[in-house]
Structure formats: structure tokens, C-alpha cells
Amino acid sequence: MATAKKTVFFFGKGKAEGRAEQKNLLGGKGANLHEMTRLGILVPGGFTISTEACVFYTNNKKKHPAGMWKQVEENLKRVERVMGATFGDPKNPLLVSVRSGARVSMPGMMDTVLNLGLNDQTLQGLIARSKNERFAYDSYRRFIQMFGDVVLGIDKQAFERLLEAQKHAKKVKLDTDLTAADLKDLVTLFKRVVKDKTGRDFPQEPKEQLRLAINAVFESWDNPRAVTYRRLHNIPGDWGTAVNVQAMVFGNLGDSSGTGVAFTRDPGTGERRFFGEYLMNAQGEDVVAGIRTPQPINQLKKAMPKVYAELERIYKRLEKHYREMLDIEFTIQDGKLYMLQCRVGKRTAGAAVKIAVDMVKERLIDHKLAVLRVDPAQLDQLLHPRVDPTAKVQKIAKGLPASPGAAVGQVVFTAAEAEAAAAKGERVILVRTETSPEDIGGMHAAQGILTARGGMTSHAAVVARGMGKPCVAGSQDITVYEEHGYLFARDLTVRRGEYITLDGGTGDVMLGEAKLIQPELSGDFATLMTWADKYRRIGVRTNADTPKDAQVSRKFGAGGIGLCRTEHMFFEGDRIDAVREMILAEDVEGRRKALAKLLPMQKADFKAILEIMGDLPVTVRTLDPPLHEFLPKTDVEIGELAKKLGLPAERLKAKVDGLHEFNPMLGYRGCRLGIEYPEITEMQAQALFEAACELRKQGKNPYPEVMIPLVGTLKELQMQQEIVERVARETMKKYGVKVRYMLGTMIEIPRACLVADEIAQVAQFFSFGTNDLTQTCLALSRDDAGKFLPLYVERGVYPDDPFVSIDQAGVGALMRMGVEKGRAVRKDLEVGICGEHGGEPRSVMFCHQIGLDYVSCSPYRVPIAKLAAAHAALKETVKVKEMGEK
């Protein structure tokens, strides 16, 4: 008979079957429990059930892998031996925790059960062993509540209401104020809830409890909040979670016991200081749930100096061993310190940058690893605004500065409200007494989060920092009345829909819409970007349509402009009138007359942009949108314009109707306009080359690139090429200077990819317009697909929204073909991308893989693209080691 595959791995008393680098098999939490045990750190004994077992369970109608349960029972006996207690023994019971643990941290998204193994008989053994009846009944009521919620599917509020009623009846505020008799009554009431809700008594057999709890943790991998979290953080759904079954140690035994959560450095700022919170006479969930406000970790130094000294020694050793900022959990039982967890700590982008740079200075890591330590997508947080220090604001409350950045929005009180409002494009602040994992969707939708309860390591704080959302937590100045739709802030009432401003860096809450300003990026950030620039091989340009955009792009270190949309210039001031006059003209002479008015305006814009960009390339796209976009839509607007231009309204309306298209994205636009109205292309080329020649005469070295949009055939590009090159020759002759320039095309329809070898006979560069290429490849309209795209992503039809991250199997295959065919004809063909994907990290990495020369994105995403490009290059040469691997 074949031996069953090993799915259960033991750790305890200095011995462990797993290692830190086995995250994929044991999950992050499990792998690190094994590693800490190997290091000789005091960790309660236990065992880890592998992620493979979870995947098998999920894929095989909730059946365990062969031999798994036998391995669980064998390892349970090993835990009994190292802990000196027996599971289910009425006199000396071993109690265990059952916790999830995916290969990456998913804080609060999956389920945990504590105090498992308690029943009416083992309760008496716990009372006798601890000599503390109150502690034992407190542990039992907690177990029934957690098991009822996680395993039996009973709404936890059914238990919470009874707990609150008991405190009210006894006239106490805190759980810790309830007596043993009070808690004994609660146990009876809680068991009655289980019977009423399930039709069965609370399970008394410890091994049945264990089996049900393990199954529940497996199943929590696919609970709604975990699925949402995976979608938001691009975590594959087929990884599964490990399950850690570990002997309980108790922080709620009395005043010499406690529990805490800490970070080896400040996760908000990156400062090198021990940062965390603890509670005496409490269990772990009390710290993160926000039910009681915890104490800062430095207070433990005064309360229990020996324990604090040991904790300090351990955290420093762990950080040095792992060479990483860690999140640790610990419990103190009767003055003895136990480590329950260590994992890579969630941190803000600012903290990530500072920690990476500081660890290089401390010689813990090198430049390459420092660059890889900062998630490119996370850099977006550094670009968040802050409250203008000169603005007059009305501060109405103060809380903990849980996640930096400032946010303005209308008050909402539920996650559902936040999601609904965000779907309509409204800015909201999610206000909760305390958040829970069920709020994940609303937290993502909101501009910021405000809570009345909870500390710096509460659910709200940890999740907000991971998302880059400003958060003010634990504001004792506010009271939330969700059901009535308002909150009290000191003596002020703020109702649903009113605007407030949060400053997650100071903890301030302000009434109304405060003025926000953008941050300056320097110091450690500049250092990290210098390292990234050293390693990346792909260029990063920016999309910029105005001189102001060009200035911002230089500030962020862009290597040029990859897309300058000339039509955006037409909407400024009175220019739209000249554009409309050109559209409404009856003949070439009329159009040329109107275009002559636009020429100096376009020239001035081009000259300013080229001057700002110096000798860097500036890719100018000729007119792209359909002409009807420049004309009024309603009868009232048509009437007003007709009067302004001195035309009959009927004639104007007829022209508007004549330009109407059923599908303008595939209609009369791009090079098609330039072919029918060559005078438009001629004017734009003249404006660009006159601007460049004037700068050249001043001794400057501008570098324009002319990009013809929507090309699908060689002939289309040749027809536009003739105009551009003729105007360039004539203008340079007129000014008596030579200007370097290139002519190329935007590749945005599938046919252009298929015949890229033909187009490259003329085009000196390609720039993939992935927004339209995605639409034409997938037969999706960006304007309409929003109705079903979220469902497609949720159900796995598409792995990601293809307008956010490049569809590598479809659109990506066309891009790869375009690159290969184009360079087969023109070896020095310059190839870039100028769609919105140019600033999305996974898309940047794909562009690196297929050999693009540059990506172009919005100015504020330039640092993200640069760091993603560095990651792409480094991951080809650097083995990214698991935490703790030497």
C-alpha cells in the first residue's frame, strides 16, 4: 500500500519539520513558526497542515487527502508530549488554537478559533489547573462565540448582544469587569443560542471540534472577504491556506498575563523603533478587534521590565535573522513570554522606502534587494495629497494617525454605502465604530477610513496601510450612530452626506472640504529611485498634453513625452471656436482660414513643451478623436453656437446630425481625418516644426516625434508621411536649421500588428495604444463594459480587468507579434507603449519581457513605472529569497 503524502508538519521544543523558505507549502505563518522554533525561541508546540491539503479539500468536494487525519492525530500526540497536557483530558486538558495562514499575509481575511478542546468536562480541569474560575469561564464563552461564528455560521452579533446586555445588567463597561458567575451565565446563554440557531447542542467531543474547525479554516479561503482581498491584491485563488494547530497559552489568566502585537520598526514612518500595543488580561483578538483600547508597547517596559527586555532581545534577533521588518505576536502567561507569530510586516509606501534605504545603510541588504523590497504599486501612496498647512480648517476630532495621507469625502456609515457611492463617482469617507473584515470592499471604495475604536494595529489600521488609504483610528472624540445616520464629534453632529477631511498622518478629523496639496518626493525616495534607474533597462516617458504636465514629468524624472494629445489643446479658451469654425467650413479655403487661427496657438504650446523637455523626445499625436466631439450636443447649445457664429441653427444642427456615428470609436477619426482633410495634418506639422526650428535657432536641441494614429495599412501611413515630411523640409529650409525628428505610428488595431512588417517600412517607431487595442482585440467598449467586467473578473473569465492590466494572452500576443514583425524589417525600430497600462506594474514587466524600449504613463505614475521596470530587470538575474533564507 502506498504511503500517504505528508501533509502535516510538527514544531515544538526546539524541533521543527519545516523551514522559513517553505511558505508555499506551510503558509507564511506556519513557515515562520517552524523557523522560530528552530532558532530556539519559545513557541507553543503545534503542527501545520499544508496548503496542498486545503487545495485538495477544495477541489474534492470537501474531502481530506488520504492519511491526513491520521497524521493530525499522530502530531497531536507529539504536541501533548511537549506541552505536558492531553487533548480532551478532564483533569489536565490541552487546548489549541486553529488558525489560517496563506503564503502571503491576508490580515483578518480568514478564520481563527481559540481555546478549542473546551467542553463541560475539560472546563473543570482548566479551573483546577489555573485556580482561576473566572479565566476558565471567560475562555469557554470566547470559544463558544468564535466556534459558533466561524464553524457553525451563527451571526456573531447574536453573542455580542448577549454580552452587551450582561454588562448593562451588571452596570459595568468592560468585559474584564464581569465576574465568574456572570460569565458562567453567559456560557449557558451562548449554548442556548447554538441550540436555537443550529437545532443541535454545542459539540462536546474535542476531536469533532478540531475536525470541524480545520474544515472551517480551509473553507474560509473562499469566504467573500478573502475572495475580495485576493482580487484587490492580485493573489491567485488556487494557492489555498495552511492551517496551524497550536497549543494555547493564555493572556487572560490575570494581571500577570497579557497579549500584544508589535512591529520591529514603525510601519507608518519606517522609523527604527519598536512599535506596537499590548493588553493585560486579554487574548489576541482583543488587541486587533478594537474592543478595548490597548497600551503602547513601551509601557510594558515599566509594567514588566524582564518580559520587555526578553521581547526586545527576541525582536532584534528575528529582524537580523530575517533581514526584514517584522510583524510579531506574543502572549505573556503568568509572566512567561511566548512568541505566537512573526511575518513580514505590512507598511506604508513611505515606510517601505525608508526601511529599504536604512537597511542598506545598516548593511543588512544590498541595493538590489532594497529595490525589490518596495512594491511598485505601493508607491502610489507617496503621491497622495496632504492638507495644505496654510488652509483654515475646523478640527472636530482627534484619533490615532493609523495610515498617512489626507482624504476628503462625504460621510457614509456602511461598506455597502461606500461601494454604491464610489460606483457613481462620489468621494466618501467610511466611518465605523470599528471595521471588520466584512468591510473590505467599502474600505477599498472609500477615500479614507475613520473609526471610533481600535488602535494602531487594529483591522482598520493594518488594512488601510496595506491599501494606501488614509485612516484615523480609535478616535474617542466621536460616537457613531449608524442606524440613525449621524455621528457626534465632541459637541457637533455630522450627518450622512456631509463632507469631512481626514489627515491620517496627524490623526485630525476636520469638518468640510480642506484644501489638499501634493507631496514633494526627495530624500530616501530619491535615493531608491536612483538605484532603480541604475538597474532598469526600459525607458519611462510620460503622457503630457500641456506645459504644466511637461514640468511635472521632468520633476518625476521622465525620459521624455510618449504621448502628447494635440486635441486636448483645442478645448482651451476660445480655441474651440476656431475648431468649430474649421469643422463647419464648406470648403478647403474655409478650413484653412480657421486652421490659420489655430496655428499660432498650437505652435506656442508645442514650443513651451519642447523647451521644457530639452533634448528629450516628445511624441506628438496628430488629431485623433472624431470631429463631432468638438460640436455641441443639445438644441440649446446648438442655438447658442449658431448665434455666436452667425449661422442658421438648422444648418448647424444638420452638420451635427451628419457627423453622428453609431460607433465613433471605430469610425471617422485618426488618420482617416487626416487623409480626407490633409490641411489638418499640414497645420499641425507646421506648428510643431516651426516651434522646433525656433528653438533650434536659439541653440537648443528639441526632439519631436510625429505619431499618426489609427493606422491599419501601409498606404494610410504613406499618405500622412508625405504631408509631414514635406512640411518638415519646407519649414527647416525657411528657418535655415536642421531638426532631428522621427515619424511613426500608434499601433492600436489588430490589423496593424498583423501587418507590422509592412508598416515598419515607413514607420521609424511604433507606440502601442493599448486602450484601443484592448477594445478592438476583445470587442469591449470601455464605456459599456463596466456593466459586466467586474462580474467577469470575479468569476475568473478574465484574470484581471483588461483595461487595468494588459491581457497578456490576447492583446499581449498581438503586441509581441507587432514587435517581432516590425523589427524583422527595421532592426532599429523604436517601440513603446502609451496607453494607461504604461503605469501599471505587471504591464510594465510584460513590456520589459517583450523588448519594448519604453513605457509612457501619466506623470504621477512615472516613479511606479520606473520601479516596476527595475523589478523586471532584477528578477531576471537576482534570486528573490524567501524571508529567512540565507
Image: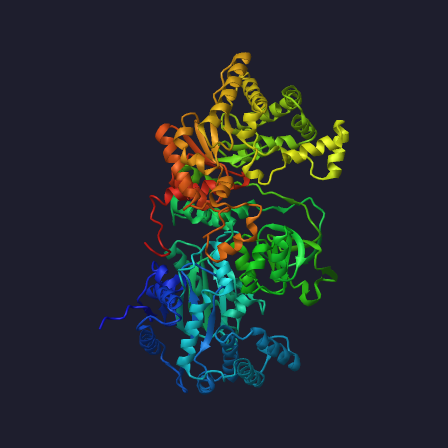
Question: What count of labels does the image hold?
Answer: 0
Residue 794's x, y, as percent?
A: 49, 57
- Residue 429 vs residue 320: left or right? right
Q: Is residue 188 above or below residue 375?
A: below
Q: Where residue 23 sits in the image (x, y, percent)?
A: 37, 60
| Camera sees residue 846 | yes
- From the viewer's perspective, tell me whether residue 840 is left or right of residue 53: right
Residue 400, can we see it? Answer: no
- Quadrant (top left, top right, bottom left, bottom right) of the C terminus: bottom left
| Above or below for 400 versus 152 | above
Task: Spot the residue most to the left.
Answer: 1
In this rendered view, identify the residue nearer to me: 406 or 292: 406
Residue 536 point in image, percent of width and height: 41, 38
Up the image or down, 86 lies above or below 635; here it is below
Q: Does 69 sit left or right of 840 as displayed?
A: left
Give the position of the N terminus as an image quadrant. bottom left
Residue 832 position in % (x across, y down): 45, 35
In the figure, is residue 58 to the left or right of 788? left
Q: Which image quarter: residue 482?
A: bottom right
Colour scheme of the rendered structure: rainbow
Choose between 416 and 405: the one closer to the eye.
416
Q: Residue at x 47, y 41 (%)?
A: 865
